[in-house]
Amino acid sequence: MSKFFYKDTPLIGLDISSSGIKVMSVDSKKWLVNGYGSIDVDPKKMREAIEDSSSTFLADTIVDLMQNKLIGTITGTRVAVAVPTAKSYTRTFTLPASAEKSLDEAVSLEAEQYIPIPISTLYIDYQIIERKNKTITVLMSAMSRTIIDNITKNIEAAKLFPTLIEPSINSVGRVLTATEDGTLPTVIVDIGPTSTDIAILDKGSIRVTGGIPIGGNTFTLDVAKKMNVSLENAHQLKVLNGLSAGPRQQRLRTALSPSLDAIITETRKVMRYYTERIDTERKLEQLLIVGSGSNVPGIGDYFTENIVIAARVASPWQKLDFGTIEEPQKQLRPRFITVAGAASVVPGAIWK
């Protein structure tokens, strides 16, 4: 797209997940939040909305969010959209530098080998993320045409205009690169309500992704069953006591360990794939835990103990400035990290 008629104005971030929609406007030069909002949805209705071209549920919910659920002010209509990583196919691969002349063909061949559905049903995009003397490293992402077309149609029906659509883990990687030294080889564990996305972030780009259908809601169910308490009480026990030392915490640790250990097993697989297949020279240096399910005290120490890597819950909020508007409650802040990453896209970079 030509930039001759292009005005470099900020984008609005829009995070469409299986359990809710978030919106945020950020001045990325000052990291000042102008406005934000969120709305929870029924996961079944959301799943149907993004797969059924006749559904208006997504458009109606976006309108409700923009009209009734905002804190602060959001102006403009152009949006950068984060969509569920689990709905995408992402792969990093290395090619001879000479392959750049026929990169479309090389990417198509890679997609045919890696993606288990016909590539004619997908939108495929890619970028060169690293160049060496004789090789190039390419990041490829693909997603169902049906899903992208439905999301785009509903966003436009809500009087917004999608400028960029990307897997949510890419949005997370962007904000961590800016706020948590994401130039280091970093493991990201993004624990959402119903699933966990795992990725390797290196030199500002996502290199490998993985995931598992276990999330913060799973933790709450585990505590409720093990301790025979209501879901509401289980959630309070989880976020107030967590995994720290003490008799109550030991019972919580016992309840949470099976799900946490499943996430750790999947994390090790992603880490091993990166070190054996993608980059055998660069050592993974940190593990950052994000997402709404990261609000469990002691979870960083648990990952450190079990994976033997410096792990902690990421906190980009020290850089994001909410100015005069009301900040999200502390326990709710992790749910906004993805939309903050989408909102911090530098518009001109899309056309580079």
Image: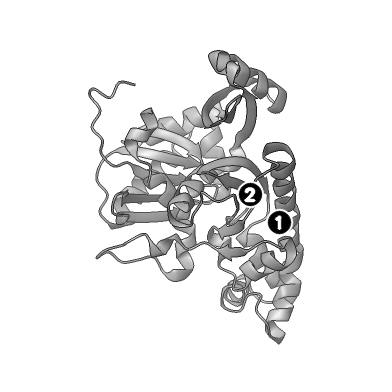
Mark earlier in primary sequence (1, 2): 2
Q: Is residue 298 visible?
A: yes
For the view shown, which residue lies furthest in the bottom direction?
Answer: 247
Q: Position of residue 96 (x, y in %)?
A: 63, 21
In which quadrant will I find the N terminus? top left
Q: Position of residue 226 (x, y in %)?
A: 75, 73
Distance (Cα) linking label 1 and label 2:
9 Å
Q: Residue 297: image x %, image y %? A: 59, 73
The type of residue carrying mark 1 is: Ile
Q: What's the amino acid at mark 2? A: Ile
In the rendered image, which residue does mark 2 sit on?
198
Do the numbered discs 1 and 2 sit on residues whose CB atoms are within 8 Å? yes
Label 2, residues with CA under 10 Å away: few <14, some 14-19, many ≥20:
many
Q: With respect to residue 249, does 222 lie above or below?
A: above
* Label drawn at residue 263: 1
Q: Nearer the viewer, residue 114 or 212?
A: 114
**What residue is rendered at 72% in x and 61% in y?**
307
